[in-house]
Amino acid sequence: MEIKIIEKKENPLLNRTEIKFECEYPTEGTPTILDVKHKLVALEDSSNDLLVVDSMKPSYGVPTAFGLAKIYDSTESLAKIETKSVIAKNEEPEEEPEEEAEDAE
């Protein structure tokens, strides 16, 4: 998976940087939002808690997706501005301890 940043725009009113990107994935399936988020965090040297991938739209018949990500200045700004659904899809899944998972079976 390769990510190219198309446009990067500062938005001081909302305390964030907005990034439009193109994601190419020629040999694999469409990447998940979390995969793209991790790659963007590495590219932008940002914190995992401050970056959210707002949307990602795959192109029909082509292994390419276009998307929008936002990097906030603080977690307070992120929580105040972003919708709950966007925050939820950008959260890491919580893993259950193995001992409890075995007891449930």
Image: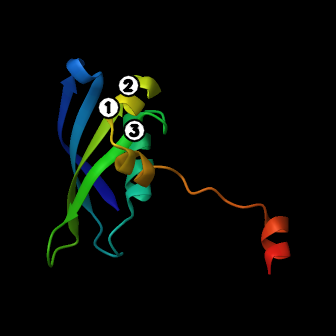
Image mark for residue 97: none
- Residue displayed at 39% across by 38% down: 51
Position of residue 9 measured from the top left corner of the image (x, y, whole percent) = 18, 29
Image mark for residue 51: 3
Position of residue 86 measured from the top left corner of the image (x, y, whole percent) = 35, 48
Label 3 or label 1, whichever lies nearer to me, is 1
Image mark for residue 77: 2
Rendered position, 14 above or below 86: above
**Contact, mark 2 vs mark 1 (Cβ under 8 Å):** yes
Badge 3: few (under 14), some or many (20 or more) residues near its Cα, within 10 Å?
many
Marked residue nearer the N-terminal end (3 or 2): 3
Badge 2: few (under 14), some or many (20 or more) residues near its Cα, within 10 Å?
some
Marked residue nearer the N-terminal end (3 or 1): 3
The quadrant the N terminus occupies is bottom left
Element class at badge 2: helix
Q: Which residue is mark 1?
A: 81
Q: To which quarter of the image does residue 100 belong?
A: bottom right
Q: Give the residue type that dot 1 points to.
A: Ile
| 36 to the left or right of 19 | right
Label 3 or label 2, whichever lies nearer to me, is 2
Q: CA distance from mark 3 to mark 1?
A: 13 Å
Q: Give the residue type that dot 2 points to.
A: Ser
| 93 to the left or right of 48 | right
Q: CA distance from mark 2 to mark 1?
A: 6 Å
- Residue displayed at 15% across by 69% down: 59
Identify the residue at the far top of this view. 12
Badge 1: few (under 14), some or many (20 or more) residues near its Cα, within 10 Å?
few
- Seen from the viewer's position, the closer of residues 4 and 83 is 83
- Residue displayed at 36% across by 66% down: 31
The quadrant the C terminus occupies is bottom right
Q: CA distance from mark 3 to mark 2?
A: 11 Å
